[in-house]
Image: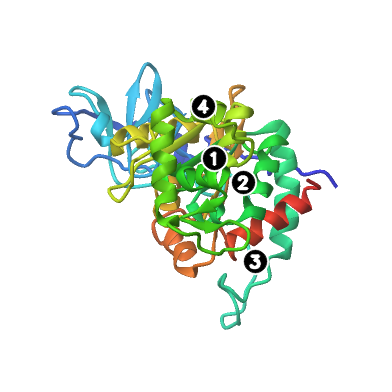
């Protein structure tokens, strides 16, 4: 059976509480980077704002940002990007009382009927995820032709030969439209392609090599010597790995730096806000996001990913968000931080990606 997206059912604006609602209040930002008092902060859900008697949907939303009325549209803007005079929506109610309507149920997800007391209601290492895999196979095949799939990766992938190969197959077969990661993922993936190790350990046998602790530094140094990753790949005749396949198939990747980074590699964004901007550039058009084995990058991505996307033809569709991690803490933390629509899978990410690749027939 082919995969079908849930249809978005917009609000019925002729309902009295919406039809009779007042216009939203607009107040100018007093300074660059400063919102007016009583500003409205966005959620992950579709939100409508009544301006001049018409309800407007915020099309490119992001949690913890503010809605700005500009050019007849609602623009969602980070606080740091506000300019003095920007017309910011003010008000902190959500059910149209102040011309602001937060609409969480547009996709009509089925709600489970549960007993007041029941076992195993949360997702944990004891949860069976067979159904999740089946849904992912269908979703990814649909998104390959109709959407945009963004992957957020921790360095664990680079430590395993089979996981690197499995993800490389996903790239080669069109299941990856962007990779977001840190310096470590790219460094150890390139180290694996260059020297056959990750942090000095053989990526297949896991045996430590003599002086292996130099290997990742040697790799970074060699990339810098050649002037960049693409030149390194060409000059050193690299022919495998995640970054190699991203370069080969022209898949963009965003590497956000960390205070703990070695090197880092030349493409790594050292300015955290520049990295955030480049990540959001990719999230703006994402329709499925899959985060694996990286707590901080996962939470950062979750905070900038809304539960919906407005397509160029005006269609509103659901955004699918998965968090895959061996740590239950990471999966639960994402929900705690407000990314309520995220689906968690608690498992080893290397096993996960190999299983996923095989299930897709790769």
Q: Nearer the viewer, mark 4 or mark 3?
A: 4
Residue underneath mark 4: 230
Q: Nearer the viewer, mark 4 or mark 1?
A: 4
Please report contact status of discs 2 and 1: CB closer than 8 Å, yes or no: yes
Q: Seen from this angle, which residue lies furthest right?
A: 1
Give the quarter of the image for residue 288: top right
Give neighbour class at mark 4: few <14, some 14-19, many 20+ (Cα, 10 Å): some
Q: Nearer the viewer, mark 2 or mark 4?
A: 4
- Give the alpha-carbon distance from disc 3 to disc 1, as whole Å: 21 Å
- Give the alpha-carbon distance from disc 4 to disc 3, as whole Å: 50 Å
Q: Is residue 6 visible?
A: yes
Q: Position of residue 48 (x, y in %)?
A: 44, 35
Label whose residue precedes the other's in the sequence (2 or 4): 2
Image disc number at residue 308: 1
Residue 112 shown left or right of residue 134 in the figure: left
Give neighbour class at mark 3: few <14, some 14-19, many 20+ (Cα, 10 Å): few
Label whose residue precedes the other's in the sequence (4 or 1): 4
- Give the alpha-carbon distance from disc 4 to disc 1, as whole Å: 35 Å
């Amino acid at each position: 059976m082919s995969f079908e997206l849930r249809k978005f059912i917009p609000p019925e604006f002729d309902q009295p509480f919406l039809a009779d609602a007042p216009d939203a209040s607009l107040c100018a930002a007093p300074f660059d980077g400063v919102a007016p008092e009583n500003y409205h902060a966005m959620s992950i859900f579709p939100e409508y704002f009544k301006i001049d008697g018409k309800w407007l949907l915020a099309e490119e939303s992001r949690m913890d940002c503010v809605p700005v009325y500009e050019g007849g549209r609602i623009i969602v803007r980070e606080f740091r990007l506000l300019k003095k005079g920007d017309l910011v929506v003010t008000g902190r109610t959500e059910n149209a009382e102040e011309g602001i309507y937060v609409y969480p149920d547009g996709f009509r997800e089925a709600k489970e009927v549960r007993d007041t007391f029941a076992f195993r209601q949360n997702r944990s290492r004891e949860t069976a995820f067979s159904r999740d895999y089946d849904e992912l196979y269908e979703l990814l095949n649909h998104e390959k032709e109709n959407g945009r799939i963004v992957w957020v990766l921790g360095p664990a992938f680079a430590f395993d030969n089979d996981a690197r190969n499995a993800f490389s197959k996903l790239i080669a077969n069109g299941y990856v439209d962007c990779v977001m990661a840190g310096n470590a993922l790219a460094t150890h993936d390139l180290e694996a392609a260059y020297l056959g190790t990750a942090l000095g350990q053989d990526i297949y046998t896991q045996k430590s090599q003599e002086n292996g602790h130099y290997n990742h530094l040697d790799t970074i140094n060699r990339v810098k010597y050649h002037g960049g990753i693409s030149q390194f790949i060409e000059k050193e005749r690299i022919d495998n790995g995640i970054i190699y396949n991203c370069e080969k198939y022209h898949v963009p990747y965003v590497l956000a730096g960390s205070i703990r980074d070695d090197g880092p590699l030349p493409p790594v964004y050292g300015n955290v806000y520049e990295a955030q901007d480049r990540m959001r550039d990719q999230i703006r058009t994402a329709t499925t996001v899959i985060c694996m084995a990286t707590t901080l990058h996962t939470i950062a991505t979750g905070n900038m990913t809304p539960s919906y996307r407005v397509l160029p033809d005006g269609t509103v569709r659901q955004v699918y968000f998965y968090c895959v991690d061996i740590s239950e803490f990471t999966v639960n933390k994402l929900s705690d931080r407000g990314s309520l629509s995220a689906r968690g899978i608690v498992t080893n990410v290397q096993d996960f990606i190999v299983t996923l690749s095989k299930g897709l027939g790769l």
